[in-house]
Amino acid sequence: MQNERQTPSPDATPYDLLGGAEGVRKLVDRFYDLMDNLPEAWEVRRLHGENLDHARDKLFKFLSGWLGGPPLYVQEYGHPMLRRRHLPFPIGTRERDQWLLCMGQALDELGIDGPLRAHLDQAFFRTADHMRNRPD
């Protein structure tokens, strides 16, 4: 991916710095490919259905708006209410860490580094940690 890995700003959002829709789609696809294939992500993978196509589409739409691009998820589903939507799934520290492992490796493989990577790592951790709904 070719970009300057700048710090996100109103003029250059993370969405823009990742390469827009194409970059976000690549990130989401690699993330779910990893989740589907890494044995160390088994517990978080089992929380998803057998087919990951719906999850891929929803995460792509969510990340599009969350990263500063078009609010595709909100347009189709309304406010994300992430914590509420994740309550039916038992998410603890292990599942959070497995999710972050897959996302971190996807970011690594796409060559996302520098200030953009630091920003994304912090934002993904805060969000993933907020999804925990069971004690460990």
Image: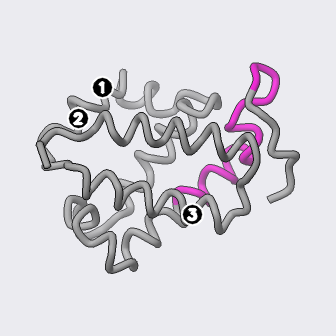
Image point (41%, 31%), residue name: 76
Report crowding for label 2: few under 14, some 14 to 19, many 20 or more residues within 10 A (C-alpha): few
Q: Vertically, is 100 above or below 65?
A: below
Q: Are marks 2 and 1 in contact (CB under 8 Å)?
A: yes
Report crowding for label 3: few under 14, some 14 to 19, many 20 or more residues within 10 A (C-alpha): many
Task: Locate residue 89 relative to residue 69 in the image: left or right.
Answer: left
Q: Vertically, is 112 above or below 77?
A: below
Q: Position of residue 73 (x, y in %)?
A: 45, 33
14 or 129, nearer to the observer: 129
Q: Vertically, is 67 above or below 91?
A: above
Tell me, yes or no, whether the highlighted magenta stretch contains residue 25: yes
Secondary structure at badge 1 equals loop
In the rendered structure, find residue 106 and report the number of the disc placed on it: 3
Kindly identify the amino acid type of the residue bearing the numbered disc 2: Arg
Nearer-N-terminus badge (1/3): 1
For residue 127, what is the image quadrant? top left
Image point (39%, 68%), residue name: 35
Q: Position of residue 135 (x, y in %)?
A: 12, 43
Task: Give the magenta range.
Answer: 9-28
Kindly identify the amino acid type of the residue bearing the numbered disc 3: Ala
Image point (72%, 47%), residue name: 18
Q: Position of residue 123 (x, y in %)?
A: 52, 35
Residue where numbered disc 1 is placed: 81
In the rendered structure, find residue 85 and report the number of the disc placed on it: 2
Secondary structure at badge 3 equals helix
* Scheme of image coloration: one colour
Q: Are marks 1 and 3 in contact (CB under 8 Å)?
A: no
